[in-house]
Image (cartoon, helix red, strand yellow):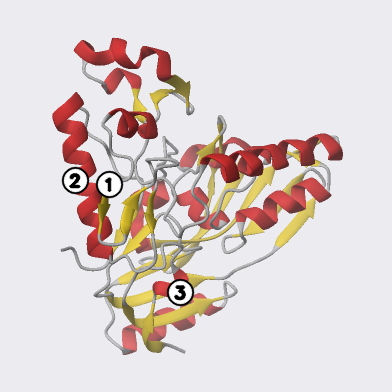
Amino acid sequence: MFKKNVLLKPYSSYRVGGPAAYFTEIKNEDEIKQVLTEARKNNINSIFILGGGTNLLINDRGFNGLVIKISIDFIRKEENSVEVGAGTLLADLVNFCGFNSLSGFEWAGGLPGTVGGAIRGNSGAFKGEIKDNLIQVKSFDLEKKKIVIRLKNKCNFGYRQSIFKKLGPREIILSAKFNLMPGDKKEIHKQIEEKIEYRKEKHPIEYPSAGSIFKNVPFLSIPENIREEFSKNIKTDPVPVVAAGRILNLANLKGEKIGDAMISEKHPNYIVNLGNALSEDVEKLIKFAKNKVKKKFGIELEEEITYVGKSF
């Protein structure tokens, strides 16, 4: 059931990362207990749950434990709601909604990753978030060895945050239900395409990356003495924030490089892999950017990405 020493690089949107000591893939709920039994036999204590491999920086020295890739992939329509497997690509869900004239996921056009990963980090864009249309989430508690179903108000959603992110590998998201509204197919497709085209134009999708490196900064957390400098750059995401990319741009960080890792000249909240970047290059560049922003503005940038494996 478990593969050994599986290179994680191909499973990462960054195309960075070393081997997992153990690796397995779950395609349905019934396989979870088998995986847990096998993990106990191998005395495995460290577990990492892998979705689409976005928003991750996997260490080149790998992960000394079990990586469980969630490949539970299905979409079931129930009148004006859908049930979706955690391993389903967001792109597939967006396309399904467009084809079936269901409105509610236009904001996610072009967004990478899986539904489970999006729920974990409460992914959002264009004033929308994954929680907005959510009804409930089904997960598996690895400690109690049972299925858990939570309504949206029990998921503790916040800005790029959820109870699942706080629990870490203790719970595996299995599926979710979303409430959607019937809409005009042409208009839904139009809005989806607008979001996709925006990403192509503004984001460095021609290079491997993890997506946004830093969270946007709540306006009220910016030191009072420099708020005026950013007052014209406030956007709703969903609270008043200043885009991390704007702050990084004002700190003149575009184009900074360490090895083959570079702060994108197209969008400075992306650190791209020019070809052969090491995880260490990326992490050093993240620290460099944080230090420069802190020194220049007194602003503490917080990573949106998750670190996987040994620290440097």
Task: Report which residue position mark 2 lands on.
Answer: 288
Can the viewer see residue 142 in this picture?
no
Q: Is residue 30 left or right of residue 260?
A: right
Give the mark, 3 or 1, whose residue is nearer the N terminus.
3
Front residue of 217/14: it is: 14
- Per the rendering, the mark at residue 10 is 3
Q: Is residue 50 left or right of residue 259?
A: right
x and y, in percent, of residue 226 in the image: 23, 14
Identify whether 199 is placed above or below 273.
above
x and y, in percent, of residue 7 in the image: 38, 80
Amino acid at pointer 2: Phe
Task: Report which residue position mark 1 lands on.
Answer: 256
Give the mark, 1 or 2, whose residue is nearer the N terminus.
1
Nearer the viewer's eye, disc 3 or disc 1?
Answer: 1
Q: Residue at x 85, y 35 (%)?
A: 184
Whether residues under marks 1 and 2 lie with C-beta atoms below 8 angstroms apart, the answer is: yes
Q: Is residue 243 left or right of residue 70?
A: left
Q: Residue at x 34, y 41 (%)?
A: 214
Using the rendered view, name the quadrant where residue 37 is placed. Answer: bottom left
Using the rendered view, name the quadrant where residue 8 is placed. Answer: bottom left
Whether residues under marks 3 and 1 lie with C-beta atoms below 8 angstroms apart, the answer is: no
SS under mark 3: helix
x and y, in percent, of residue 161 in the image: 40, 42
Nearer the viewer's eye, disc 3 or disc 2?
Answer: 2
Q: Residues within 10 Å of mark 1 (few under 14, many from 20)?
A: some
- Per the rendering, the mark at residue 71 is none
Amino acid at pointer 1: Glu
Front residue of 228/126: it is: 228
SS under mark 2: helix
Identify whether 116 is placed above or below 36.
above
Q: Residue at x 22, y 28 (%)?
A: 299
